[in-house]
Image (cartoon, rainbow, N blue to C red):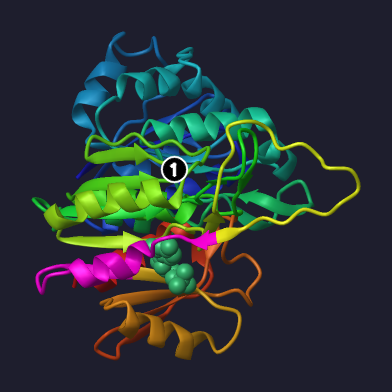
Amino acid sequence: MRIVVGITGGIAAYKAPELVRLLKKAGHEVRCAATEHALEFVTRTTLETVSQNSLYCDLFASGRTEHISLKDWGEMLVIAPATANIIGKVANGIADDALSTLLLAFSGKPVIMAPAMNCEMWAHPAVQRNIETLKSWGIRMVGPEEGELACGVSGVGRMAEPAAIAAAVYAAVQPQQLQGQHWLVTAGPTYERIDSVRFIGNYSSGKMGFALAQTLADAGAEVELVSGPTSLSINHPRIHRTSVESAREMYAAATEAFPRCNGAILSAAVADYRPSECTDHKLKKNGSEGMHLDLVQNPDILATLGSMKTSEQTLVGFALETDNEEANAQHKLEKKNLDYIVLNSLRDKGAGFGVDTNKVTIIGRNGSRKESPLMSKQEVAHLIIKTITL
Ligand code: C5P
């Protein structure tokens, strides 16, 4: 593949030549583009030597349309490191130097970014908003990781290692082995209405399900993503999203889509119970008395799909257990007629609800068992898809 590696001005730029070397070693052709500030950290000579190509850095130096010829040449753009500045510029459509101009011109082709910055900068709402914007346009993020930062403090902001970035490139250039297939993914929480302003919900963020949908779509599948309420957005031509609120709405959407799917992964955190009645006005406090909510059971979507499943279809469920984890997961796998169950670890810090990382055990109907280390939800999604589609 012809890959453009863009380098911006952060200390992690010193690792960019190593990334270029790894990509070259994997057989890719590489050209580098750098911002002026990047060259404070890594030299033109180093980048031109490792890439064996001339560096693109000055918008006006060699013919004024090099950003266009470079975007025509490149099949993928990898920005490593990506500073808060380049992230902010692209999210807001600013093109005021060679690299940001190339980035805006580089539409319709895969872009991967490896953000790197101080942890306070990373946590800033402006940066987080910009990251979400870029992700919703389909730009893939690798890292940042937690660890020691150049400024002496520890926190989230370290650039992912060149090997992890090269692995993300590898994953993105995989042949589309799921082309022609249809998959269903459920994600996020459900909200069960109590009255016109209140609901019963849970802390699920939807991140795991969205990462699964993205991975399936990247592998060529058409994806029906049925999502409960979440702030996440996703933009991929092969992902068709249906937004639902309650378990019953999710049930209707999932059972309608499943018959035309090759498989389904149900990662949503579905409420087991809902209030037996929902009033259309706000319930009033009644003196100093307590209040009782009468709950009824929701339909089990996973068990229903298990009973609908044909021998051609693959069905994958998730399990979040607090005790007898593996035995309970195994029991669920059999009872709900699943092919795989993904057991979320609740014991490990950084795994489960809301966070960006997860640690899982994938148990197969045939007795197979694969345990992951603590990894990003994207990496967990890759492992799950690889395991269930082998
Ligand atoms: O039985 P339990 O709720 O622990 O099973 C979890 C799995 O079942 C998850 O895959 C979840 O998405 C799915 N589920 C469902 N419908 C329900 C409850 C859970 O699809 N009503």
- Mark 1 belongs to which amino acid? Thr
Question: Split into 4 quadrants, where in the image is the C terminus?
Answer: bottom left
Identify residue for label 1: 46
Q: Please name whichever residue, 330 or 307, is drawn nearer the observer in this view of the structure.
A: 307
Q: Residue at x 10, y 74 (%)?
A: 311
SS for tag 1?
helix
Would you identify the image quadrant in which residue 198 lies? top right
Residue at horizontal 36%, vertical 69%?
Answer: 317
Q: Is residue 49 left or right of residue 321?
A: left
Q: Is 148 one of the magenta-colored residues?
A: no
Res 52 quadrant in image: top left
Within-10-Å neighbours for mark 1: few <14, some 14–19, many 20+: some
The reply to whether residue 380 is visible in this rendering is no
Report the residue that reaches farthest toward the right: 288
Q: Position of residue 319 (x, y in %)?
A: 46, 73
Above/below status of 252 relative to 329: above
* Nearer the observer, 348 or 308: 308
Is residue 307 inside the magenta stretch? yes
**Label 1 CB-ligand 1 distance < 8 A:** no
Q: Which residues are magenta?
A: 296-316
